[in-house]
Amino acid sequence: MSLAVEVNNLVKVFGNIRALDGLSFSVRVGEIFGLIGPNGAGKTTTLRIISTLLLPTSGTVKVFGLDVVKNPDEVRKIISYLPEEAGAYRYLSGLEYLEFMAKFYAKSPDEATTMIKEAAEISGLGERLKDKTKGYSKGMKRRLLVARALMIKPKLAILDEPTSGLDVIHAYHIREIIKKYVRDHGITVLLSSHNMLEVEHLCDRVALINKGRIVVEGKPSDLKEKFDCSNLEEVFAKVVKIA
Amino acid sequence: MLKGFGNFLLKELKELARDPKILLGMIIVPMVIFPVIGGVMGYAIQSAKEQAVKMNIFVVNNDAGEWSIRFINFLKELGVQVQVLENIELKDENVQWLLSSYNATMLLEIPPGFSKNVTAYFSNPNTKAYLRFYGVITSASFFETAGSSMVDSLVNQFNRCVAPDVLLTEKSTVIKGEVKRGIDPAMISSLMMSQSIALPVTVMILLTYSVQIAATSVAMEKEEKTLETLLTIPMDRFAILLGKLSSSVIIAAVGAVAYMVGYGYMVNIMLSDIPGALNLDLASLGLAPSPAGYLLLGVSLFVTIFSALALAVILSAFAEDVRSAQSYVGFIYPFVFLPAFALMYLDISALPLAVRLLFYAIPFSHPIIASKAVLTGDYFTVVIGIIYVSIFTIVIMYIASRLFATEKILTMKLRFKGLKRRGTIVSEES
């Protein structure tokens, strides 16, 4: 089976903090893979390394066979990263922001226009796309950014806490967007969340991460069955105690 | 007293006093910069005093009548040091020869017919008696207007004692070996003075303005959380850096043009007050740069702005938000203000070697040095300055590009507590 992401024995040290401690997992092509764990577990650091933002202290990371340290430029062409606390440019309209981003990926003006149309549809922001983003609510901004991340049809979308800080309605909307997009375009999604219940409904497979290590990995249903739990939160609690 | 006010105030004071940025910006920097500026001013005032002591008037009396003697005695009674020469016909060459041989900066001629005219005034007040004043302009300095105004004051006092408006003064300026008749040296001097103030002030404003723009622009990417996204899209990271610098340069250039237009307008207004000044070749007199001089000045200004911007980008890369970035670029300001203020008053070539080298080492001195050097046609100094600042800029740009190329742009923060460990790498979140 071909792999979209291969992480092997990944270590990241910041000063005297060992943020990642020999982390290994892999993501298959076309699946939604969730990294779940509490705050400070190492989810964001892992996603940042895969997104070529940070360099690993040791270990290897490959995205569709490309090494993120040796070929960062090639990796950037096929991924789309949505940081947890991403923002948009205050003085650009939603549409201008999408146009700005589309131009980095589109090979022709027509392709850029198609991307922007697609993003407008994903975001569901309608006429509000013409407004400057400084007037957007948190939910609107997040929808815009998710649309930006998906509109380019990346081979791998890396979404860090995609529904972070959103209310139930907005979070639901975002999850539906992700599901629909993966189904329609066959892209691979690697996302992180500390909301285990949400991940359970969204991801094909998950990896539970704690203190910079993967403690367990598998399909949500398999994990629940294996540990005899009714949800992933309980699985995590059990695993961490066992680990 | 408001309930809780005291407690809250104490908390505020503690917070402020413990913020190293405030300590540095509000206390340490002024404590350093003001004594330095004071020292510079003191030096400038000392030189002015020395010049003032040397000031005395050469009077060439070509009249030999009763009123010319009275006028000279009047000056002496007022305590003016007067040196009288008699019967020298003052043609342009004589004026220069006299001034240079007596090492004088001003000359007052009492022309033939002076006494006759004063006497005639009493029967016909329309008759006026004239004095001729020649003032030398050497370099832009605050204190050269003194001679011309002193003569005005003396003539006014004489008129008050004798009769209103009996004496008038015809003024001429001696500049770069030429006698420009009918041009008041005070006007030329104030034009030069305005240049010696206006250009450093312009440079100062431009530099601080563009540094603010660049710092804000980089810090905004961090504050608005757009930098991470930007760093993961398929674009050259050096392009991000260059984009930041270029947009700041463009905004600063628009500002520069606005300032220069305003400055040109100011010079024109001042020139229109000088009769006949519009017929002067300002560039050849050293009152305005030649086209080549303007070009070199522009290049000097451009490379200096670029160096300041690159420096601002590096400093703001350490900042988490706009506010911190603006505090950090505050470190640049003393190096901008110091040469601007100091060189406004001082001629760099007259400074001791160590001080001169210090000014040359500060890149932001160079457009100010250049602004004076282009007036005197010293293009060599300007070119050397441009080369120096360009090398400085390349080094800074290299460091900035390295910062943008690595993860440091995301992870570096300046920790004042750990200044011993400058540039500590920390993770925002794991």
Image (cartoon, helix red, strand yellow):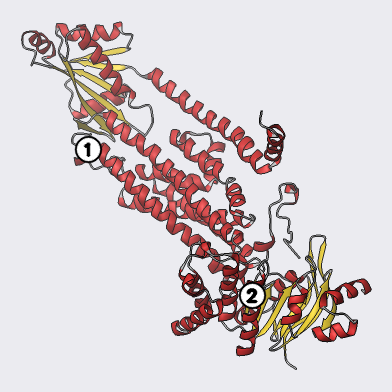
Q: Residue B259: x percent and y percent? A: 37, 47
Residue A224 found in image quarter: bottom right
Frontmost of labels 2 and 1 is 2
Q: Nearer the viewer, residue B363 or B58?
A: B363
Residue A187 vertical placement versus B332 (above, below): below
Residue B316 found in image quarter: bottom right
The residue positioned 54% from the left and 44% from the top of the image is B333
Q: Residue A19: x percent and y percent? A: 80, 67
Residue that extends furthest to the right in the rendered view of this protein? A242
Position of A27 with respect to A117 (left or right) is right
Residue B423 vertical placement versus A74 (above, below): above
Mark 2 to mark 1 CA distance (whole Å) = 63 Å
The residue positioned 7% from the left and 10% from the top of the image is B120
Q: Residue B243: x percent and y percent? A: 50, 65
Which quarter of the figure is the N terminus of chain A placed in?
bottom right
Q: Residue A85: x percent and y percent? A: 65, 65
The residue positioned 6% from the left and 8% from the top of the image is B123
Q: Which residue is mark 1?
A: B272
Position of B429 with respect to B45 (left or right) is right
Q: Amino acid at mark 1?
A: Ser
Q: Amino acid at mark 2?
A: Tyr
Secondary structure of residue under mark 2: strand
- Residue A9 visible in the snapshot: no
Residue A63 found in image quarter: bottom right
- Residue A81's tag is 2
Q: Residues within 10 Å of mark 2 (few under 14, many from 20)?
A: many
- Residue B113's tag is none
Q: Nearer the viewer, residue A27 or A232?
A: A232
